[in-house]
C-alpha cells in the first residue's frame, strides 16, 4: 500500500495479546535504523482504516507505547475499547498478525526529564500504557524508588496485572504497587490517593495519566503531598480532530509585521522571516523545513522546541507542564513571535 504522506511509515503487526476483555496489546516489528527510536512515555500516531461515521476512510489516533525501548525489541501499543468509539474498537476487533498500519514516528513530551530519586506514577485504565514503559525503563536504568498507584473499575479490568506483580516481586525494595479498585473503594479521590504516597516527597516527581476526573484528583494529591508543581507531569488522552497524515494546510500570512527566527533543525541552521500572526510551525513548513508535528492543536507536544533567545506567546498549551516551560520548551504549532529576533532549536 502506498504511504499517504512522506511523514508516514508502514508498520507490520506481528502479535496481538488480549490483556483484558476490553484491551489488547498490538505488537509491531520495529523498522531498522533510528526512524522509530523512542523514549519511554512517547506515542505512535496510527492511521486506523475503515469508514468512520464522519465519512472519511480512516481515523488518525495516538496510542502510547507500552513497550520499553531499552528492554523490548519490538514496538507495542495497548488499546482499550472506548464505548461508542471508532478506532479503539476497530483495532480491538481487527488487529491481527500480518496487518500493516501506517504510523507517524514516535512523538510526545511525557518523558522523564528531571532525573528524580523517587517517582510516584499514577494511572487509571488505559493510562497505564506510557506509565508501564516509564516504570520498566526506570527500574532497569536508574536507582529511583517508585510508587505506582493504579485505578481500575474492578480486578478483571486491570491491564498488565501479572506483569506488575512480577515487577514488584523482582524489585521488592524499589517498587510498591497500590491498586485502587472502584468496585471496592468508589472513584479515586485526592485524599485516598494521597494516602498511598511515600512519606517523604522532597525529591519526588509525579507522572500522571488517566481520564480528566482522575487527573484532577491525582494532581491535588501530589500537591497535598508536597510535590513541587514543576515536577508533576501529565499525559491527557483524547482523539485527534485534525489529520496529521494530510499534507498540512498553512494559515495564510496576512500580517505586515515580520520578526526573524533563527532555527536549528536536524543539525542545520537557517534564518527566516516570521510573520507575527503566523505560528512558527506554519512558517517553517512554508519554508520547506521538515519540522515535527502531530496534532497541531497544542495537545500532544510533538512540535516542541527549545527557545534559546527572544520571546514567543503560545495561543494554546495543553501539552507542556510548568517544568518544561521553565526550561524554555515551547510548542511550534501554537507559538507566535513577541519580539523581533528569536532563536530556537529542535531536538
Ligand atoms: C498522546 C495520546 C496517547 C494515547 N494513548 C492511548 C493508549 O495508550 N491507549 C488507549 O486506549 N488510548 C490512548 N489514547 C486515546 C486514543 O487516541 C483515542 O482517543 C481512543 O482510543 C478513543 O478513540 P476512538 O476512535 O475509539 O473513539 P472516538 O470515535 O474518537 O470517540 C471518543 C468518544 O467520543 C464519543 N463520540 C464520538 N463521536 C461523537 C459525536 N459525533 N458526538 C458525541 N460524541 C461522540 C464516543 O462515543 C466516545 O465516547 C491516547 C491519546 C493521546 C492523545
Ligand atoms: S503538534 Fe501537537 S502540540 Fe503541536
Image: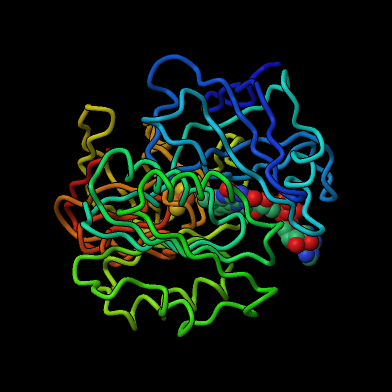
Where's the C terminus, which quadrant? top left
Inspect this view and state whether residue 316 appears: yes
Q: Residue at x 71, y 57 (%)?
A: 156
The answer to whether 65 appears left or right of 3 in the picture is left
Front position in the image: 190 or 101: 190
Front position in the image: 324 or 53: 324
Q: Residue at x 40, y 60 (%)?
A: 176
Inspect this view and state whether residue 241 appears: no
Q: Residue at x 74, y 39 (%)?
A: 91
Quadrant of res 126: bottom right
Vertical side of 327 occupied by 268: above or below: above
Residue lying furthest left? 309
The answer to whether 23 appears left or right of 9 in the picture is right
Q: Residue at x 84, y 40 (%)?
A: 51
On the image, the x and y values in percent for residue 95 come to 75, 31
Vertical side of 156 occupied by 316: above or below: below
The answer to whether 23 appears left or right of 128 in the picture is right
Front position in the image: 78 or 276: 78
On the image, the x and y values in percent for residue 24 come to 69, 41
Q: Quadrant of ligand 1?
A: bottom right
Amino acid at each position: 500500500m502506498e504511504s499517504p504522506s512522506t511523514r508516514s511509515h508502514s508498520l507490520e503487526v506481528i502479535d496481538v495479546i488480549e490483556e483484558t476483555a476490553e484491551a489488547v496489546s498490538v505488537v509491531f516489528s520495529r523498522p531498522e535504523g533510528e526512524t522509530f527510536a523512542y523514549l519511554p512515555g512517547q506515542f505512535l500516531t496510527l492511521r486506523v482504516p475503515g469508514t468512520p461515521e464522519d465519512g472519511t476512510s480512516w481515523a488518525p489516533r495516538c496510542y502510547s507505547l507500552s513497550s520499553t525501548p531499552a528492554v523490548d525489541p519490538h514496538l507495542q501499543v495497548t488499546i482499550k475499547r472506548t464505548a461508542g468509539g471508532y478506532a479503539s474498537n476497530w483495532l480491538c476487533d481487527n488487529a491481527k498478525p500480518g496487518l500493516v498500519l501506517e504510523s507517524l514516528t514516535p512523538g510526545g513530551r511525557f518523558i522523564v526529564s528531571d532525573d528524580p530519586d523517587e517517582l510516584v506514577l499514577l494511572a487509571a485504565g488505559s493510562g497505564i500504557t506510557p506509565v508501564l514503559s516509564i516504570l520498566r525503563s526506570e527500574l532497569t536504568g536508574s536507582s529511583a524508588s517508585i510508587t505506582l498507584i493504579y485505578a481500575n473499575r474492578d480486578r478483571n479490568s486491570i491491564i498488565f496485572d501479572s506483569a506488575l506483580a512480577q515487577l514488584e516481586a523482582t524489585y521488592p525494595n524499589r517498587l510498591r504497587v497500590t491498586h485502587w479498585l472502584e468496585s471496592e473503594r468508589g472513584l479515586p479521590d485526592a485524599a485516598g490517593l494521597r494516602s498511598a504516597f511515600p512519606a517523604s516527597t522532597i525529591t519526588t516527581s509525579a507522572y500522571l495519566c488517566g481520564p480528566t476526573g482522575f487527573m484532577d484528583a491525582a494532581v491535588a494529591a501530589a500537591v497535598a503531598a508536597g510535590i513541587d508543581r514543576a515536577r508533576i507531569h501529565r499525559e491527557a488522552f483524547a482523539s485527534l480532530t485534525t489529520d496529521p497524515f494530510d499534507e498540512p494546510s498553512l494559515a495564510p500570512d496576512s500580517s505586515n509585521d515580520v520578526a526573524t527566527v533563527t532555527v536549528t533543525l536536524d543539525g542545520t541552521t537557517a534564518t527566516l522571516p516570521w510573520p507575527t500572526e503566523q505560528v512558527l510551525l506554519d512558517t517553517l513548513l512554508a519554508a520547506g523545513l521538515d519540522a515535527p508535528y502531530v496534532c497541531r492543536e497544542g495537545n500532544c507536544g510533538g512540535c516542541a522546541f527549545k527557545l534559546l533567545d527572544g520571546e514567543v506567546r503560545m495561543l494554546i498549551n495543553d501539552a507542556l507542564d510548568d517544568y518544561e516551560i521553565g526550561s524554555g520548551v515551547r510548542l511550534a504549532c501554537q507559538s507566535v513571535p513577541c519580539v523581533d529576533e528569536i532563536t530556537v532549536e529542535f531536538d
